[in-house]
Image (cartoon, rainbow, N blue to C red):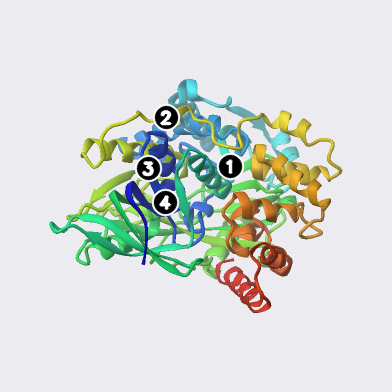
Amino acid sequence: MQLIEENYDIVIIGGGAVGSGILLDATLRGYKAILLEKNDFASGASSKSSKLIHGGVRYLEKAIKGFDKAQYDLVKEGLIERHIFLKNASVISKKIKINIPSFSYITLFYTWIGLFIYKLIAGKKNIGDNSFVNKVLSSLYFPNLKKENLKACLSFYDGSFLDSKMLIALLQTAISKGAIAKNYCEVFEFLYYENKKISGLKYFDKIENKTCEINCSCIINATGANVDNIRALDDKDAQEILALSSGIHIVVSKDFLFSDEALLIPNTSDGRIIFILPYLNHCLIGTTDNKCEYDENIKAKDEEIAYLLDEVNKYFTKPLKKEDILSSWSGIRPLIKNDNKNKTEQIVREHSINISKNGLVSIVGGKWTTYRKMAEDMMDFLVDKNYLEKRKLCETKKYKLLGNEEKHKDLEKLISFYAISKRTKESLITLYGNNATVVLNIASELNNFELIHKDFPYLKAEIIYCVEYEFVKKPIDFLCGRIGLCFVNKEASLDSVDAVCLEIGKLYNWDDERLKKEIAECKEYIYKNF
């Protein structure tokens, strides 16, 4: 047994959006904090979102139709946080124009009213003007969109981002200020004082193959869909507080969309909405909303994929087939249980904080857009309930994340003289922001600008950078959570496994047996999850 540290103020369990946000907020306030994640960072739902930063036009519709103040408040909070998000992560996030096609004048008017209210709620935090695009221009922008009965498109702006890269930026920023974050460290037991209040925990480090013990002032359970399982580890009689919902996405060629703008399909057969978005030079389509059970290796089901294809094909002249899908995945939303709601899509995406009888603090609900507010609320809560003594106030509203200090245009100039393709340059800025220059310095020192895969823009030097600076321990961390290749092309990611494993193996001095094991594990993970 190795005692890591006796005097942590905070231990955070869960390396997703919320846990990483709390780590940064806590560290900036002057607390000594450590985060533990049992797999790779962002390996759960935090990397399987629709990649949108939004107030939620769907929630606004529910607020108006049902006179639901909770939904209205969620929209307002989301729009405020959208503004902060885009400022603090100005390179790895951006605003995106979203177009809503209307096939009747009644729908057109109704949509215009809704978007006008959405803009009014945003107020000074609005990020772009709404616009009207007639049938002729809509057909030019989206040539694959069906023209029969099409009246026009109404457009508005929300934000888009790369979720797993945003999480890495949060962790890098927190660590630069003194925090500690460990992936592949699984908590398996809590420690208690004589009065049965939690005093610490034990975890197993899967990489170092050792058990460690930590004592601390408070423990935060921010494990998303796994929250109830961790609560049961503390109290086997704890009642469930989550209603889990699965949402899938599929990725197809960018030629299906023919645009850098997005489409929102507002009326599916069951009253949901579907986004069709540009994503890493591909086209992302999603999502669904179905009750589910906790599953660490959840995968998009055939019937869910068929549902998305059926709904999308109603609106496009060239139908999508299952063979057109390059990758697909499923994530689990950790919604707050509400016995009065029959469907998970009816549950408000708010968040709440729960304390067990032994003092375990759990945070549930929420979404990526409001991760920062959730972290702020958690830290204020801990101070208010005397888990921690008050130190500094929250600083995250105006705190630039690492990698986002320069403007996009300035970064283009900085890397313009490197003899690499325009596509690779754009990919480096998208994935690493300011740190694109660090990747290129590594490539220059090694005189190696070789690509990982001939059809994709990723450099082998990115593997070295991600091992040194982005916490990569296993090949799947890189392929999935750092460059996102698994999310856009399953076959290409499988083709790249051997090359990536070989490079990482050199850095970690793996022998042949370990290398074969890692190759097999990586391919198995891709088959199971995509």
Query: Which labelled disc corresponds to residue 35?
Result: 4
Marks 2 and 4 in Cβ contact (< 8 Å): no
Q: Amino acid at mark 2?
A: Glu
| Disc on the earlier residue, 3 or 2 | 3
Counting from the top left corner in percent of width and height, residue 69 is at: 31, 35
Marks 3 and 4 in Cβ contact (< 8 Å): no
Q: Is residue 396 positioned above or below 35 on the image?
A: above
Q: Badge 3, how many Cα within 10 Å: few under 14, some, many 20+?
A: some
Q: Badge 1, how many Cα within 10 Å: few under 14, some, many 20+?
A: many
Q: Quadrant of residue 426?
A: top right
Frontmost of labels 2 and 1 is 2
Frontmost of labels 3 and 2 is 3
Residue in the image at 63% along x and 56% along y: 313
| Disc on the earlier residue, 1 or 3 | 3
| Disc on the earlier residue, 2 or 4 | 4
Q: Is residue 41 positioned above or below 437 on the image?
A: below
Residue highlighted by disc 1:
161
Distance between mark 2 and mark 4 Cα atoms? 19 Å
Counting from the top left corner in percent of width and height, residue 171 is at: 50, 45
Query: Which labelled disc corresponds to residue 175?
Result: none
